[in-house]
Amino acid sequence: MDERETAGAASDGTRVGAVLFDVDGTLVDTAFLHTVAWWQAFRQADRTVAMARIHRAIGMGSDHLLEHLLGPDRDKDADGELSSAHDALFAAHWPNLRPLDGADHLLRACHRRGWRVVLASSAKDAQLSAMRAALDAEAEIDAVTGADDVQSSKPAPDLVQRALERAGVAAHEAVFVGDTRWDVEAAARAGVPCVGMLSGGWSRAELEQAGAVEVYEDPAELLGKLDASILSRPPSPQRA
């Protein structure tokens, strides 16, 4: 079966739940690498944007990030060049990408418990492939969706909705795991509860205020507290 195509039922015909994972900053330690890559891309284009502002936009796809940082009156014809510069600068880090502590074990634990494991990332296909290689947990990943699969990236709900489609489950049968306000907002707009991670540099208070139902330091902490988390519960019954 193509890894991007999924069935919505177990072999006995019953519905199963899905855990939808953001990747950048949630499973792989890339949030600040993206910050530096965007800062360098802006500098190459003679644009000065403070790293603190850039960091707060990481988690958005480039479509929303450039609008957020440069505003609607920017020269939009330069967006493609800025995005390409960021991609090239970030690609220099690919050989050194590392999963966050416990990330691969968390995916395996969710898989063993019967959840469908779906990656839902604002990254483009090439970047997503590099991060999946760093994760080294392909056997536990049931489906993948990225920025190239949707018209609008996070904080729009499109990625979460596409991930639900590929998992073959309804919103009330899923949980999203992400590290930024943009993840929480995208999940909420799709009707999916979101578990927050502090590994992307956002604070616990910020993620909770955005609507995260639980917040953990990193994948390792969630893994250690899995039995007490929302992921210990079976998905909600199928609604009529």
Image (cartoon, helix red, strand yellow):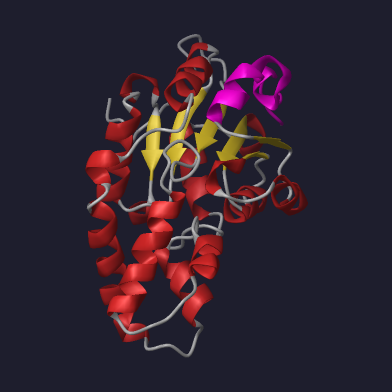
* Residue 8 seen from this side: no
| Quarter containing the N terminus | top left
Residue 59 sits above or below residue 131 on the image: below
Q: Position of residue 80 (x, y in %)?
A: 28, 74
Residue 211 sits above or below residue 73 on the image: above
Q: Tell me what residue is drawn at x 61 percent, y 25 percent.
A: 221
Q: Tell me what residue is drawn at x 47 percent, y 41 percent.
A: 163
Q: Is residue 173 left or right of residue 146?
A: right
Q: Position of residue 49 (x, y in %)?
A: 46, 77
Magenta residue span: 219-239
Q: Position of residue 95 (x, y in %)?
A: 22, 41
Residue 120, quarter of the rendered image: top left
Q: 154 and 82: which one is in front?
A: 82
* Residue 94 seen from this side: yes
| Quarter containing the C terminus | top right
User: In the image as oriented, which residue stretches furthest toward the top?
Assistant: 12
Determine if the magenta segment contains residue 6: no
Q: Tell me what residue is drawn at x 51 percent, y 61 percent.
A: 55
Residue 126 sits above or below residue 136 on the image: below
Q: 6 and 51: which one is in front?
A: 51
Residue 147, quarter of the rendered image: bottom left
Q: 206 and 126: which one is in front?
A: 206
Q: Tell me what residue is drawn at x 52 percent, y 39 percent.
A: 164
How many numbered circles does the render carry?
0
Determine if the magenta segment contains residue 238: yes
Q: Position of residue 122 (x, y in %)?
A: 43, 53
